Amino acid sequence: MTRDAMVPRRPVLLSEGAAPARWLGEGWAALRRTWLLWRQRARSRAELDLIPAHRLKDLPFDTSTILNERAKHLWEA
């Protein structure tokens, strides 16, 4: 048995020709997009909390729909 046969090989995470810096940059960009989306959801749900209860019936949505949207976590679509 050769010495190389005993060393376990690590899986290749990057495709051939992909630069690690580019791969890392794309990962950060995806993370930033997700963070911005979550921030937008948190803001819009916080704005729903500012609407007084007596004004909810004036909106073109069912009150239970609005209350369910308020209760969602920021990562829930």
Image (cartoon, rainbow, N blue to C red):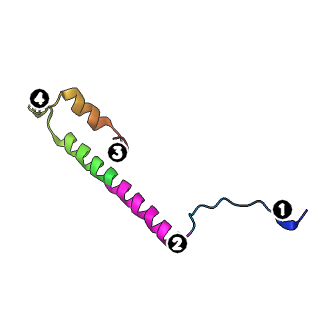
| Residue with the most extreme left position | 58
> Which residues, given as a range, are shown in magenta?
17-36
Read off the residue under disc 4.
57
**Residue 71 x/y as whole percent:** 31, 35
User: Marks 4/3: CA distance?
Assistant: 24 Å
The question of residue 29 being in magenta is answered with yes
Q: Tell me the crowding category of disc 4: few under 14, some 14 to 19, or many 20 or more residues within 10 angstroms, Cα based.
A: few
Read off the residue under disc 2.
19
* Amino acid marked by disc 3: Leu
Label placed on residue 5: 1
Quadrant containing the C terminus is top left
> Who comes first in sequence, dot 4 or dot 2?
2
User: Marks 4/2: CA distance?
Assistant: 55 Å
Give the SS element for disc 3: loop
User: Marks 1/4: CA distance?
Assistant: 72 Å
* Amino acid marked by disc 1: Ala
In contact (CB < 8 Å): disc 2 and disc 1: no
Nearest to the eye among marks 3 and 2: give it.
2
In contact (CB < 8 Å): disc 4 and disc 2: no
Looking at the rendering, which quadrant does residue 52 occupy?
top left
**Residue 1 x/y as whole percent:** 91, 62
Relative placement, left or right, of 56 versus 34 is left
The question of residue 47 being in magenta is answered with no
> Who comes first in sequence, dot 1 or dot 4?
1
